[in-house]
Amino acid sequence: MRTPFYDFHCQWQGKMIDFFGFEMPLYYQGIIPEHLAVRNSCGLFDVSHMGRVEIRGKDAINFVDFVTTNAVKELKPYQAQYSVFCYESGGIVDDLVVYNLEDHFLLVVNASNREKDINWLKKNLSGEVEIIDRTFEIAQLALQGPKAEEILGKITNSSLSEIKFYWAKRVKVAEVECLVSRTGYTGEDGFELYFSKDEAPKIWPALFNAGKEFNLVPCGLGARNTLRLEMRYCLYGNDITAETDPLSAGLGFVVKLNKGDFIGKPALEGIKKGGLKRKLVGFEVAGERVAREHFKILNEKREEIGFVTSGSFSPSLKKPIGLGYVAIEYSEIGTPLFFLSPRGEELKGVVVKTPFYKMGSLKRG
Amino acid sequence: MSLVPDDLFYTKTHEWVKIEDNTALCGITDFAQKELSDIVYVDITEMGKELNQGERFGTIEAVKTVSDLYLPVSGEIIQVNDLIKNDPGIINQEPYGRGWIIKIRIKNKEELKNLLKAEDYKKHIGEV
């Protein structure tokens, strides 16, 4: 599958890879320069491979509230929220962003889970609700970085400063009707733009023209991963899965146990009551080697206490960082950890406070 | 398309070899550096040791992934490129030039016939 920006990716010489059936750029000039562009200036990501699902009908609000763990009923029109779908077991179906768009809800889900999510939503359908997959009609771009507002401001006649973090607005960008939200997954100020896929050939060049003076660069999936990891944002399939729950993953802030009934609530209440057995922690590795996904985590006695879920070199901090589950007694900041590669090599590290990167423009703004 | 110079020998594991009398320079190919993406560290574990053709002599750590390095011909690693110790990104920029990785004292030149020529390597990476 291709997004409406495929020709642009090729034109910019993107290194194309298969990403859950989508031909997507891993990088154009390189992961590190793209990562740093987002931290220091601005980068543009094609995120049209993500799933965009509309929920409509009289009972839409009750339905979305029932299938997600966050408090959907508290959302004001044009407000967005990060959330998760849980199974009855408390295991995670997917993580997503929920938009309240007045007459309907927009759910933005992971590309890897889109079909699974839609099937799961249909299975749990109740009341007068319509589920419409808009993934292939709507394009989505993420403009991320401290210069995002200045760049986007040049090609819209609407005030972007009115859009607060995790809020959206309908504005014209380069004469095109867009839904613009102040969201993203990089730790930087920035916007996500939703618009008809037919307008893709207009929006992409308009953004790069506006961004020329700020050296706006296109960014691939590689930088998207390192940016989110530096912020300790979870990646579905790695840090969160059907075998993990949002409380152990450190996503308790999107689990509203005091709201009405929702799928997974009894299980999550049980996990909370019983106390967490393990926890997703951030770690740094000493030296240059990276503790990658699936490395075992050991304690000082070299007993297995967990496993790595994400590991990478951090372009901002210039050292290896990662996330992994450890038995709860090893989750304190400063706890020494050892990592065992599948080949038996051992690396040494320590549990650290997250986010790893603390200077993002999101915090400054 | 990846750059595959005609005057080099190649391995199926994406190393290149440049023969200079009884020594050889070795690095990784343009194709390999693109696959790995940004290289952040090169660890040569077997410096000064005599190894056989195809044996692992080190590791390349890139942002996205990690990869092993295999000795293209039997011999001893007599030098590691100092430039890449300080700036491994040079391998991404100039995989066949300043981004060479090791110098090998070749034990047996007969083994060169086990390596791929440019045309065969291009076929191997599906770029013909």
Image: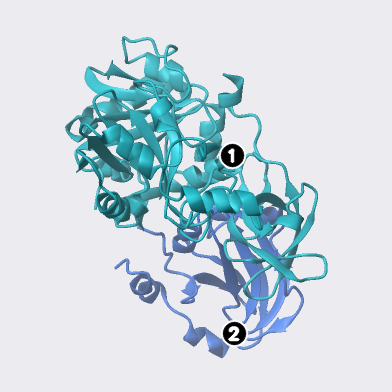
Chain colours: A cyan, B blue
Say above or below: A194 vs B106.
above
Q: Is residue A61 visible?
A: yes
Q: Tell me the crowding category of disc 1: few under 14, some 14 to 19, or many 20 or more residues within 10 angstroms, Cα based.
A: some
Three-letter code, disc 1: Met
Q: Residue at x 51, y 54 (%)?
A: A267
Circle 2: element type: loop
Q: Chain of mark 1?
A: A
Residue A198, compared with residue A226, is above or below; it is above
Q: Please, what is the three-letter code of the amino acid marked with disc 2?
A: Gln
Query: What is the distance, in whole Å, between disc 2 and disc 1 at their CAs?
Result: 43 Å
Single out the mark in the foreground, 2 or 1: 1
Relative side of A38 to A125, left or right: right
User: Which chain is indicated by disc 2?
Assistant: B
Q: Residue at x 22, y 21 (%)?
A: A176
Q: Is residue A197 found left or right of B78 in the rendered image?
A: left
Which SS class for mark 1? Answer: loop
Judging by the rendered image, the residue that carries numbered circle 2 is: B53
How far from the left and from the top, in percent, is residue A52?
A: 29, 40
B12 or B64: nearer the eye? B64
From the viewer's perspective, is A230 left or right of A225? right
Q: Give the residue at the far left of this rendering.
A: A198
Screen quadrant of the C terminus of chain A? top right
Q: How many neighbours does mark 2 have within 10 angstroms: few (below 14), some (14-19), or many (20 or more)?
A: some
Q: Nearer the viewer, residue A275 or A337?
A: A275
The residue wearing badge 1 is A231
Residue B92 horizontal/vertical position (percent): 53, 53
